[in-house]
Image: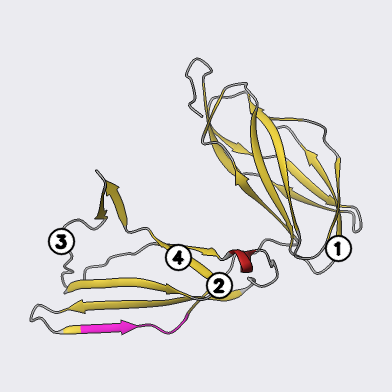
Amino acid sequence: MFMEKVSLEPSIMYNVAELNSVNQAGECVTTFGTRTYLQPMDTRQYLYCLKPKKEFAEKAGIIKGVTVIGKLDIVWKTNLGERGRLQTSQLQRMAPGYGDVRLSLEAIPDTVNLEEPFHITCKITNCSERTMDLVLEMCNTNSIHWCGISGRQLGKLHPSSSLCLALTLLSSVQGLQSISGLRLTDTFLKRTYEYDDIAQVCVVSSAIKVES
């Protein structure tokens, strides 16, 4: 069977990026090699990255629970040249749950120097249906040390609203380190949300210069 086309047509809420090819010497080369044939009982997996469109991502309550992500369009030919096509119905998947408050990273460096401060930008989104009054606490770990004042008042955050924060931290241990230790407390309900393993950063010796 010759695989002529396999594509994911996203729903109106998502943009899709195909991850089934790599760039080699300026040319786009498929990850499946030069052979596009499937032998009997062969299996092939296709990978796609879906991201909510900006107008939907900013409305935290829209993408929750089961959501329609799109449909697959598959075209093939048999060894006799006969063409076949399969277009699936709309595929549904469970969207990741973020709870009442979502914390995401908008900017973070890939590599940083040991014991030298670096900056990250966090985005906090109120996914609940009530207004929150948030306080940010920064807890050090064995390797990650936050710079600045912990217990900062962030103020009121209305439903589906977001705010961005620039934070500074440093690592005292080399290697791949997880960014952990952020805590958000809603003073209205006295409820604390913990955020660990938010992202990872590669920490190298300061003798190795990190290009910006």
Q: Give me the residue at 63% from left, 73% from top.
A: 65
Which of label 2 and label 1 is nearer to you?
2
Label 4, secondary structure: give it.
strand
Distance, label 2 to label 4, CA atoms, is 10 Å
Distance, label 4 to label 3, CA atoms, is 25 Å
Label 2, secondary structure: give it.
loop
Distance, label 1 to label 4, CA atoms, is 32 Å
Front-most of residues 135 and 39: 135
Q: Give me the residue at 90% from left, 54% from top.
A: 190
Q: Percent x, y for residue 172?
A: 62, 23
Q: Is residue 22 magenta?
A: no
The image's mark for residue 13 is 2
Q: Is residue 86 magenta?
A: yes
Q: Earlier in the sequence, mark 3 or mark 2?
A: 2
- Rate crowding at label 1 as few (under 14), some (14 to 19) or many (20 or more) other CA atoms within 10 Å: some
Mark 4 highlights which residue? 16
- Rate crowding at label 3 as few (under 14), some (14 to 19) or many (20 or more) other CA atoms within 10 Å: few
Relative to residue 23, is residue 33 drawn left or right? left
Q: Are marks 2 and 1 in contact (CB under 8 Å)?
A: no
Relative to residue 82, is residue 183 drawn left or right? right
Residue type indicated by callout 1: Thr
Q: Earlier in the sequence, mark 2 or mark 1?
A: 2
